[in-house]
Image (tube, coloured by chain):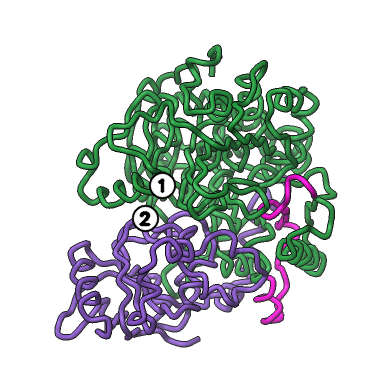
Chain colours: A green, B purple
Amino acid sequence: MSDTRNLFNRVWDNHVVRELASGQSQIFIGQHLIHEVTSPQAFQMLRDRGLKVMYPERTLATVDHIIPTEIQSRPFADGLAEEMMTAIEKNCDEFGITLLDLNDDRQGVVHIVGPELGVTQPGMTIACGDSHTSTHGAFGSIAMGIGTSQVAAVLASQTLPMSRPKVRRVEVNGELGPGVYAKDVALYIIRKLGVQGGVGYAYEFAGTVFDAMTMEERMTVCNMSIEGGARCGYINPDQTTVDYIRGRPFAPQGAAFEKAAEYWLSLASGPDAQYDDVVVYDAADIEPTVTWGINPGQSIGVSEEIGSVDSFPEQEQAGVREALTFMELEEHQPIKGLKIDVAFVGSCTNGRISDLREAARVAEGHKVADHVRALIVPGSQQVRKQAEEEGLDKIFEEAGFQWRAAGCSMCLAMNPDKLSGRELCASSSNRNFKGRQGSPTGRTLLMSPAMVAAAAIAGEVVDVREVAAPVGV
Amino acid sequence: MKKIVKVTGPGMPLLLDDIDTDRIIPARYLRCVTFDGLGDHVFKDDREQHGDHVFDRDHHQDAKVLVAGRNFGCGSSREHAPQALLRWGIEAIIAESFAEIFHGNCTALGIPCVHATPEQLKQINAAVEADPTLHLTVCLETSTVTHGDTKHDCHVHEGTRTALVSGQWDYLGELLEGEPQIRETASQLPYVTNFA
C-alpha cells in the first residue's frame, strides 16, 4: 500500500518517544533555538531542580530582541537589557551551550540565523521560545513556538508533551503579478482564513506559487503561519531546499549531504497524501496588501478601500469598530494616500538579504520624504555584511534611510527603536497589535519591504507597482 | 503536584475577541530575568488608555476566573502573559477559543482553559457584570462552569483536563522518566547521527 501520510505526519511519527498519561505524545525536539527573552527563567527552573541540559549540542543560542541597533558597546545603556545579556552569557557558559553573541559575526535574529547557518533542516522538529519559530517550516520541518516552561522542558529532556494537530493544505496556484511578494501571499491567506482560522491545524503551503518561491520567500510565508492561528506552517522540501542548504556550515558535508538530500526529498507529501482540510486560492487574486487594523487579518489590497463595519461577519464587527477607532480610520477610506511617520524594514519576517535588495531597488535614486523617519535593520550580521558588499547600505543612506546593526528592533521595540505617541509606521514586520512597536498608542501598517520603501519615499501609502519598475517575482 | 479539580471565585468580565499577548503584557515589561512583579503590568496599556478598565475596578480586585472571547492569547509565545495573569490573581480562564501556544503555557502553569460557546460566555459575562461578587465555579471533573443555580456544560481539552485533574500538569518529571526512550528515538533519527 502506498504511504498516504503527508510530510507533517511522517515527521511527527519519526519523533514520537512514547504516549504520556495525559494522552499526549512525548515528542523529541531535534533542534532547540534560544534567545535572551524567554530563556532566563527556564534556566532558573533547571537550577531549582538540579537538572542539566540533556542535549546541549542540539541547542543554539543567539541574542536578538533587546539588542540596540545603534550603540552596541557594553554595558548597554538600558540596565535591564544588560542584565538579560549577562544572564544568557552566564547560562550558556554554565550549561555548555553555543551562544552567538554580539562579538560573533553569526549573531542575528534567531529565525534568520538558523536557516542561514544550515542549522535548520528538513525533517526535523524545531522548537524555540518565540512564536515565529514557524519560519523554519519553510524547510519541511515541524517548527513550533513555545513558552518558557516548555523551554525548560526541552532543555532538560529534549522533548515536549504534544497533541497531534490536524493538517490543512493551503494551495495557491498560478503566478504572482509584478510587485506582489511572499508577504502579500501570507497576508492574503490570513485575511481569507482569519487570525484564528488555523487553530488546531498545521498549514501545508503548496501549489505552483510556493514551488516557484525562493527559500527566503518561503520563510516569510511560514513565518506568518502563527498570525493565522496555525500551530506551524511548512512547505515540502524540493531541489530549491536542497540547493539552499548545500555548503552551509552546520549542514552535512560531502557524502553525508547527498544521503541527507535523498532523505529530505523522501519526506515530502506525495500525490496521494491525505489532509484534514484543503483550501485553494488563485495567485491572480493577490495584490500588494496592507493591514489597516489591529490584527494581521485586517488587511486589504492596496487599491481597495476599507469596508463598512456591516460588511464584516457579525462576530467581527466589534473588533472592526475598535480597530477603526484606534487607527483613526473611517469606513470606505482608501488605504492609499495615508500619510506615514515612520518606515521600518527588518524583522524575522522580512529582514533577509532579498528583502533588503527589493527595498533598495525601490529606494535607489530617491529621497525619503522629509517628515518620515526610516530605518533599515538587517536580520543578521551576515545579512548586513552581504548588503554592504553589494552596496545596498550606500543606496539606503543616500536616500536618507538609517542603516542599523542586526536585531529585532522596531518589530516589538524591546530595544531603543520605538514609535512615539500616535506615530503611524509602514512596517515589514509581522504584527500590527496595539502598542506592538513600543508606543502604547502607536499604529502599524504591515506590508512588504518594497511597499515600505515606496511609502518612505512618497511619505504615504502608495502602490509599489506605480512607483517602481516591476520585476519578475 | 497539586491536583487542580475546581477553581471557585469571583469572575472578571472581559468578553473581547482576539486579545493578543502584547496587550496582556506589553513587550517593554519583558525586559526581566524573572517573572516576579509581572502581575502589576497586566493589560497596562489598555488600563492607562481607558480609565475604567475592568482590571482596575475596585469590585473586581478579588477576581479569579477570567471571562474572555474568541482566540484569547493570540500572538507572541511569551509565557509572561499567563504568568502576569496568574500573579495578578487569575486562576482559570473561560473563552470561546484560545491561541494554542497560550493554551499550552496556561496548562504548564496549572491554569485551566475552558471552552464555552458565545451564548454561554454572554450569559456568564452578564452575570458577573451584574454582580461582581458572584462566584464562578470551574469544575474540571464535569467540564462545567456554575454560578448560582445556573450550570453550563463547557469543554476542556482532554489532555489538559487529565493532566490538571491528576496533578501531572507539571510534566517535566514525567518527560524525564522517559530518558531511555528519548535516547532510543534520537538514535533512530538520521540527522542526530549526522547521516552517517
**Up/down of B7 relative to A373, above or below:** below
- Near mark 2 (Cα within 10 A), the count class, few <14, some 14-19 or many ≥20, is many
Q: Position of residue A288 (x, y in %)?
A: 44, 26
Residue at 41% of width from left, 50% of height from top?
Answer: A229
State how far apart marks 1 and 2 are (Cα).
Answer: 8 Å
**Which residue is the extreme one toward the left?**
B149
Depth check, front residue: A131 or A280: A131
Residue at 39% of width from left, 67% of height from top?
Answer: B51
Q: Position of residue B22 (x, y in %)?
A: 49, 58
Secondary structure at badge 2 equals loop
Q: Amino acid at mark 2?
A: Asp
Depth check, front residue: A70 or A153: A70
Q: Position of residue A94 (x, y in %)?
A: 81, 69
Q: Is residue A45 magenta?
A: yes
Name the residue tied to disc 1: A295
Residue at 72% of width from left, 61% of height from top?
Answer: A81
Residue at 46% of width from left, 21% of height from top?
Answer: A463
Which portion, as a residue range, is magenta?
A43-71
**Up/down of B190 relative to A206, above or below:** below
Q: Chain of mark 1?
A: A
Name the residue tied to disc 2: B18
**Up/down of A89 relative to A179, above or below:** below
Q: Amino acid at mark 1?
A: Asn
Q: Is residue B127 magenta?
A: no
Q: Position of residue A404 (x, y in %)?
A: 73, 39
Asked if badges 1 and 2 are on one and the same chain, I answer no
Depth check, front residue: B147 or B38: B38
